[in-house]
Image (spheres, rainbow, N blue to C red):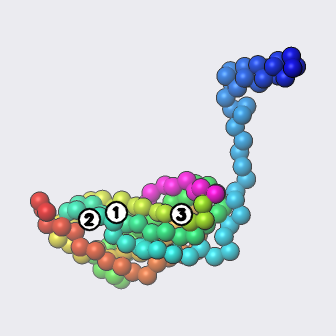
Amino acid sequence: MAIKLALAVTVGTLLASNPTVAQVVLPPAPKAAQVKIIAGPSLEIAHEGEAIIKWTTNNPGGKDNHYGVVKYGTSPNSLSQTASSPIRLNRGHPETVFRVSVTGLQPRTTYYYTVTSMESDGTSDGVTSSVSQFTTAAPGE
């Protein structure tokens, strides 16, 4: 009993003085055989200058830090602008929900977009949606 208590006190002291002792860096999770968009993409909300695009994929695996990416523009053939948002994957969940805020939009304008996702090092998850569209509101709406 005294040995267990002394060990607990020693470990507790180590953790308090050096919190990195307890940190464990996990290797990347196994990558999914194929990443698929299983819901969306859809417009969650749009104002005159901002839109939030949401979609769900199966869990892509790989590195825990990922990005949701929206490529957009005012022509379906020229999606030259990019917005992205970081997300940390939950290894215990079979699905991942991405949300990306697209800002600096013009009011009363139709935008076209596709969505994709990638690991923090830029490695694509290998899935891109078809082109969708939304229209921003007029000022004051």
Look at mark 1 in the image and give the residue it sits on.
Answer: 52
Q: Which residues are magenta?
A: 84-92
Residue 36 figure quarter: bottom right
How far is mark 3 from mark 1, CA to CA? Answer: 16 Å
How crowded pointer 3 is (Cα within 10 Å; few <14, some 14-19, many 20+) is rated as some
Tell me which label, 3 or 1, sits earlier in the chain.
1
Most distant residue in the front direction: 1
Q: Name the residue rendered at 67%, 29% in the picture.
A: 19
Residue 54, position as x, y percentages in the image: 41, 66
Q: Name the residue rendered at 82%, 18% in the picture.
A: 6
Amino acid type assigned to the residue bearing label 3 in the image: Thr
Does dot 1 land on a helix, a strand or a loop? strand
Q: Name the residue rendered at 33%, 66% in the picture.
A: 44
Magenta run includes residue 130: no
Look at mark 2 in the image and give the residue it sits on.
Answer: 46
Closest to the camera, between mark 3 and mark 1, is 3
Residue 99, position as x, y percentages in the image: 42, 61
Amino acid type assigned to the residue bearing label 2 in the image: Ala
Look at mark 3 in the image and give the residue it sits on.
Answer: 96
Task: Inspect this view and state whether residue 80 appears.
Answer: no
